[in-house]
Image (tube, rainbow, N blue to C red):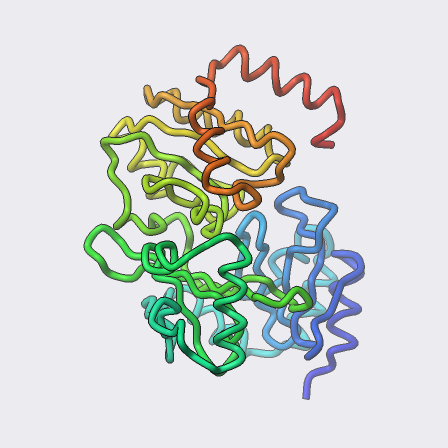
């Protein structure tokens, strides 16, 4: 039996206060890697030491790697009490298991007549977000009846050949620790629902998969707040010189400027979509998105720097 209290004490000395889930297994801290010091998005499994930040996607087999940067003593203590089983979990992460459709997956569009209360709750949640049967089919939205993915909307992703390469499961209940559950796949190695994309046409980039439900057809999700030049998505856009609209969350203007600059260096035409007072595309209706898209402005290097400076002076990203 693990000494959870001692492990949390070690982590808290370096990472600060944490929030534990109801089972006492997952502890959420502020991530030292991504710089988001306002949210506890770095989740550490107390029993195994595995960690993952839901913002910057930093992940690994042992949190000792993070502890060692600030306190070698804390890292040594952690490794001393966790034992040799860390090697097994490291192997599991490195192997990056093949992605498969979750067991028991069912399409919502084929379950509209169901009387199962959890299934009805999933259907109602989708309707409450302004989505209909068309969106259920187009995004192949589904659910499972039992297990850790129950009462979650599952959106699978397929590559250009129709093979599944990812999925995300969003909780329909507010008071759930971990809004999303995803397979342990490096996000830079695939393109979310590439099967829907035409690289010859203008493409829209949003952050999260469920933002896509408010976009028109040629759109994909970055899956977080980072997109490196080595990622499959960046490489596809750059090699095809696909005109791109950035429709990113309103709290990341500095990264929007950075990505626009990076894409433009590969002669990719870039536009910026103005969200107005909304936090993300998911808060829009489809009609509102289309109107905003029609008004998206061309990104210009110098104008982008000026706008970023204004935002920083206002303190909105501090």
Position above or below: 229 against 24: above
What residue appears at the point 29 percent right and 48 percent down from the top-left corner?
194
Q: Nearer the viewer, residue 41 or 74?
A: 41
Left or right for 314, reference 55: right
Q: Residue 185: percent from the left, percent from the top?
A: 41, 60
Position above or below: 235 against 224: above
Q: Quadrant of the C terminus?
A: top right
Image quarter for residue 313? top right
What residue appears at the point 35 percent right and 55 percent down from the top-left corner?
134
Q: Nearer the viewer, residue 48 or 205?
A: 205
Q: Residue 117: percent from the left, percent from the top?
A: 53, 80
Q: Quadrant of the N terminus?
A: bottom right
Q: Residue 140: percent from the left, percent from the top?
A: 34, 61
Q: Residue 252: percent from the left, percent from the top?
A: 60, 34
- Which residue reaches farthest front? 113
Left or right for 115, reference 161: right
Position above or below: 137 against 188: below
Q: Nearer the viewer, residue 104 or 315?
A: 104
- Which residue reaches farthest left? 161
Left or right for 91, reference 258: left
Count of numbered circles on the image? 0
- Which residue reaches farthest bottom? 1
Q: Nearer the viewer, residue 266 or 315?
A: 315
Image quarter for residue 17? bottom right
Image quarter for residue 315? top right
What residue appears at the point 52 percent right and 41 percent down from the top-left corner?
281
């Amino acid at each position: 039996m693990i000494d959870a209290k001692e492990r949390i004490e070690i982590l808290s000395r370096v990472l600060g206060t944490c929030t534990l889930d109801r089972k006492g297994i997952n502890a959420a801290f502020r991530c030292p890697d991504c710089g988001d010091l306002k949210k506890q998005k770095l989740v550490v499994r107390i029993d195994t030491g595995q960690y993952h930040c839901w913002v910057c996607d930093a992940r690994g087999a042992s949190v000792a790697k993070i502890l060692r940067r600030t306190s070698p003593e804390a890292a040594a203590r952690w490794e001393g009490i966790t034992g040799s089983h860390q090697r097994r979990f490291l192997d599991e992460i490195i192997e990056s298991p093949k992605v498969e459709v979750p067991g028991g997956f069912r399409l919502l569009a084929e379950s509209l007549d169901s009387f199962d209360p959890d299934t009805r709750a999933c259907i109602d949640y989708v309707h409450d977000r302004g989505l209909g049967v068309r969106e259920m089919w187009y995004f192949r939205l589904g659910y499972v009846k039992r297990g850790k993915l129950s009462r979650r909307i599952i959106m699978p992703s397929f590559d250009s050949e129709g093979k599944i390469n990812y999925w995300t499961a969003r909780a329909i209940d507010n008071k759930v620790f971990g809004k999303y559950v995803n397979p342990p796949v490096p996000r830079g190695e695939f393109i979310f629902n590439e099967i829907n994309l035409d690289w010859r046409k203008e493409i829209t980039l949003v952050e999260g998969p469920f933002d896509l439900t408010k976009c028109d057809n040629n759109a994909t999700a970055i899956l977080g707040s980072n997109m490196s030049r080595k990622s499959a998505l960046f490489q596809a856009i750059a090699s095809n010189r696909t005109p791109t609209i950035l429709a990113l969350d309103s709290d990341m203007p500095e990264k929007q400027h950075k990505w626009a600059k990076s894409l433009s260096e590969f002669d990719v035409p870039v536009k910026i979509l103005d969200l107005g007072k909304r936090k993300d595309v998911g808060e829009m209706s489809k009609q509102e998105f289309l109107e905003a898209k029609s008004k998206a402005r061309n990104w210009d290097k110098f104008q982008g720097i000026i706008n970023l400076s204004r935002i920083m002076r206002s303190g909105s990203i501090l």
